[in-house]
Amino acid sequence: MLQSLLADRFHLAAHRETKELPIYALTMARVDGRIGHGLVESTPGACTPTADDFPPAPAADQTPWCGVKGTYQAAANGGRFLELRARGITLARLARNLSSVLQFHVEDETGSAGTFDVTLDYSLDSDLLSQFAAPPLSTALQEQLGLKLGSRNGPVEVYVIDHAEHPSAN
């Protein structure tokens, strides 16, 4: 519906394309592949799977939904503290959530096919004062989850706008 509205009102013409761009690769931080204390393998059937981060209708047996919940707290010094709690998610899904947080493409390269419960507390502020409450994201990933982000180039799907005009009248 949105695509047809944009095409109608703005005469928007666009297409998808895959480009080689800088990305973050999510990998295991430890050579032995051990995970951190904030990353626990999920118990099968402990939550109701869902394709997105919105809870589905409550399950008849009251099983909680699988998904991600993040909270944000602003600090007095201007820092931004965040916590991410997840239940029954893959590391590929965690990478997608990190992409939203970082506003930069994150690709799962851990090789893990399992599902996990995640507890991650971090800060998006590099100010030293904020680090006393929560470490920066890269440090938190390594210390709490046993994962790390590395930068490299990789394929990213992008939208290319071919044509757009000022909107037509209502």
Image (cartoon, rainbow, N blue to C red):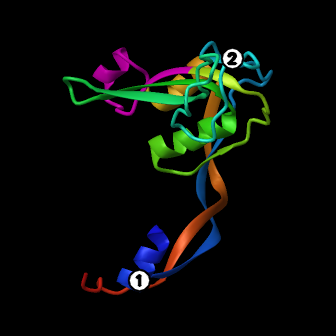
Q: Residue at x 56, y 34 (%)?
A: 56
Q: CA distance from mark 1 to mark 2?
A: 46 Å
Q: Residue at x 59, y 26 (%)?
A: 65
Q: Mark 2 highlights which residue?
A: 46
Report the disc number at residue 8: 1
Where in the figure is residue 50, as x and y percent of width and height? Answer: 63, 36
Q: Residue at x 41, y 83 (%)?
A: 8
| Along the line of sight, the residue nearer the viewer: 170 or 138 | 170
Where in the figure is residue 37, as x and y percent of width and height? Answer: 63, 12
Q: Is residue 62 left or right of residue 70?
A: right
Where in the figure is residue 49, as x and y percent of width and height? Answer: 67, 31
Relative to 4, is 78 above or below? above
Q: Is residue 99 magenta?
A: no
Highlighted range, magenta? 119-135
Quadrant location of the C terminus in the rendered image: bottom left
Using the rendered view, name the quadrant where residue 76 is placed. top left
Q: Secondary structure at mark 2?
A: loop
Within-10-Å neighbours for mark 1: few <14, some 14–19, many 20+: few
Give the amino acid at mark 1: Asp
